[in-house]
Amino acid sequence: MRPETNFEKVPIDRVAVEERVGRLNKRSIKKESKVQALKLALSMVDLTTLEGKDSEGKVRQLCQKAKSPHPSMPDIPSVAAVCVYPNMVRIAKESLRGTNINVASVASAFPSGMAPLPIRIEDTKYAVEEGADEVDMVITRGAFLEGEYNFVFDEIAAIKEACGDAHLKVILETGELHTFENVRLASDIAMEAGADFIKTSTGKISPAATQPVTLVMLEAIRDFYYKTDKMVGMKPAGGIRTAKQALQYLVLVKETLGAAWLNNEYFRFGASSLANDLLMQIVKQQTGHYQGPDYFSID
Amino acid sequence: MSERIEVQKTYKTYVGGSFPRSESGHYYKVFDSEGDFLANACRCTRKDFRDAVLAARAAFSGWSSRTSYNKGQILYRIAEMMENRRDQFVKELGQIGFSKEEADADINASIDRLIYYAGWTDKYLQVFGSVNPVASSHFNFSILEPTGVVSVLAPEASPLLGLVSVISPIIAGGNTCIVHASEQYPLPAISFAEVLNSSDVPGGVVNIITGIRSELVEHFSSHMDVNSILYTDELDKETKTKIDELASNNIKRVVKKNISDWYEEDSANPYFIVDFQETKTTWHPVGF
C-alpha cells in the first residue's frame, strides 16, 4: 500500500555533497588494507553484459569468469552476481549451478522502461521464472519528472510483487533526473515501494554513476534505515572502471552507512571492465609489478 | 617603476600531451656546469611512470594506424618547430657547458636526425618487408608491425641530440614511448617536449619524465604493459641483469646499444627502426 506520507523533496546542498566526496577521496588505503579492499570490491561486482549482440557463448564465458576471475590465482574471490537480459537468464543459471553466484536480470522493458505496466510485469515474471535471483528494473523517468510520483511508486510496488522471492533493484537512471533533489526523492519513493536495492543507472545513459549522486543515495538509505530499521542496498552502475574509483566508493559507503553495508548483500558495483582492473591491482600488490591487460581475459 | 622581475619557467613533465608535475610533489635540483643552481626538476616516481604508460598505451592504436606518409610529415614538423626554437636550446645547452658552436652543432644534428627518420617512415616497410619464396602455391609476405609501447632510458650525457636520436626511430616506426630524460641534464628534454607539443604529435605518443634513474629503472623494466625497453648507456652489470630479469616477465624486447658519440654516422640508421618492429608473415593462397 502507498504510504500516507506525501513525497516531499529533501533539499540537498550540492556544494557540500561535492566537497564531502572530494574530502573522502583523499583517504589513502595502502598495502594489506588495500589488498583486502580490492578483494572486497571484487566480491561486490555484478559482472554485467547488456548488449544487443549478447550470445549464449558470451554469457557462458562471463559466468566462467564470475566463478574464477583469474584462474592462476585461486585465492581470489568470485564476484557477487552475473547480470544479463531476461532471455539469457536460463543460460547463466545453468552455467552457475552449484556456486553461490546469483543471476541478476534486467527486466521491465530495460533500459527505457517505456512499455505498458502489464508488459513490464510479464517481463519481470518471465525473468524470475527463468531463475533470476535478482531483478533490476528501471523507473519511468518521464512520469517522475512530470511529478507523477504515485505512478512511479505504484509501478515499483507492482514489479516488486511480480518478483516474488527475487530481490528487486530499482534503477533511478540518475543521469536523467537532473537534480540531486530528484535523485533523493526517487530514492525515497523506491525504498518506500519495497526496493531491496537502489541503483544509479542503466549504463546506457551518460553520465552514469558518479560519486556525488551515490553519496546522495547512500544518505537516503541511511535516513530510511533510521526511520524504518530496514537496510536497503546500493548499487552504483556504469562508468566505474578503475580499482581506484571502486575503493573511493567503498570509503563513501563506510563513512555514510558503516561496516554493516560493506558486503555484497548490501553493496554492489554494476560493471564489466572494473573486474579486470581490480584483478590487475591485486596482482600488482602481490608481485610489485604493474600489470597489463594482455595478461587478463578480454571481457 | 620598480625593477622588472624575470618570469622563470617551471620545468614539469610531459605526459599524454600535457605538462603535469610529478604526482609525488617531489623535486631534485639541477645545476649548471659551474655548479650553480639552475632549476628544480620533477623527481618522478613509479606512479608518474604508470600514468605515462597509460597515456602511451592509449595513444598507440591511433599513432600506429596513421599512414607512413603522415608520420613522416609529423616528424618533419617537429624538425621545423625545433629550428624555430634554436635560441632556447642554445641557451639551455650553454648553461650545461656547451659553447655556442657546440650547441649549434648539437641542434643542427638533432634537426637533421628528425628529417632523416622522417624520410624513412614510408621506406623502411619496403626495404625490410619481403615477399618470400615458398614451395607451395602461396604468396608469402613478411611485413613489419610496431612493437607497441617502448620505455626508454635516454642517453645521460647527450641531453638533446641523444634524446632526439632515440625517440625518432621509435615513433617513426609507429610505436609510442615513455622516456626518462637525462638525470643530470633534464632541462633540454622538457623544452623538446614543448616542441613536440606544438608539432601535431598526438598526446601520449612521446611521454617524457624526469627523476632519479636508479629509482625508476625497475619500473621501466617490469611494467607488464610495456613491450620493449631501450638503453644506450653503459650500465653496471647489476642494473643490466635486473633489467633483463624483469623484462623477461612479459618477454619485453630489450634493446641495448652502446653509443657514446651521437655524431657518429652509425648512430642513425634504419635498423634502429627495425629494432622496434615485429615481423608478421602471411600465407596467402595463389588465385587462378
Image (tube, coloured by chain):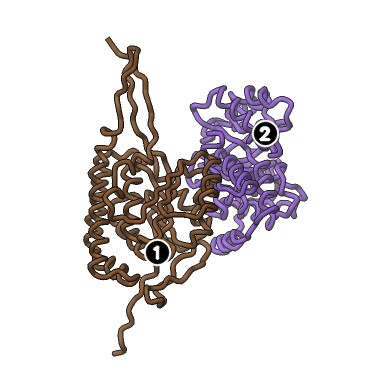
Chain colours: A purple, B brown
- Label 2: few (<14), some or many (≥20) within 10 Å? many
| Horizontal side of residue B14 vs A260, given as left or right | left
Q: Position of residue B214 (x, y in %)?
A: 52, 59
Q: Residue furthest bottom?
A: B1
Which mark, by number, is residue A134? 2
Residue B124 or residue A186, whichever sits in front: B124
Image quadrant of residue A190? top right
Circle 2: element type: strand
* Residue under the point 29% across and 34% down: B125
Disc count in the image?
A: 2
Name the chain under label 1: B
Measured Cα–Cα span from mark 1 to mark 2: 57 Å
Q: Is residue A149 above or below residue A53?
A: below
Q: Is residue B76 left or right of residue A83?
A: left
Do we see residue A241 in this rendering? no
Give x and y (percent) for residue A87: 58, 23
Q: Position of residue A188 (x, y in %)?
A: 65, 49
Residue at the image point whose x is 44% and y is 49% from the top: B151
Indicate left or right for B272 with A12 as reference: left
Quadrant containing the C terminus of chain B in the rendered view: top left
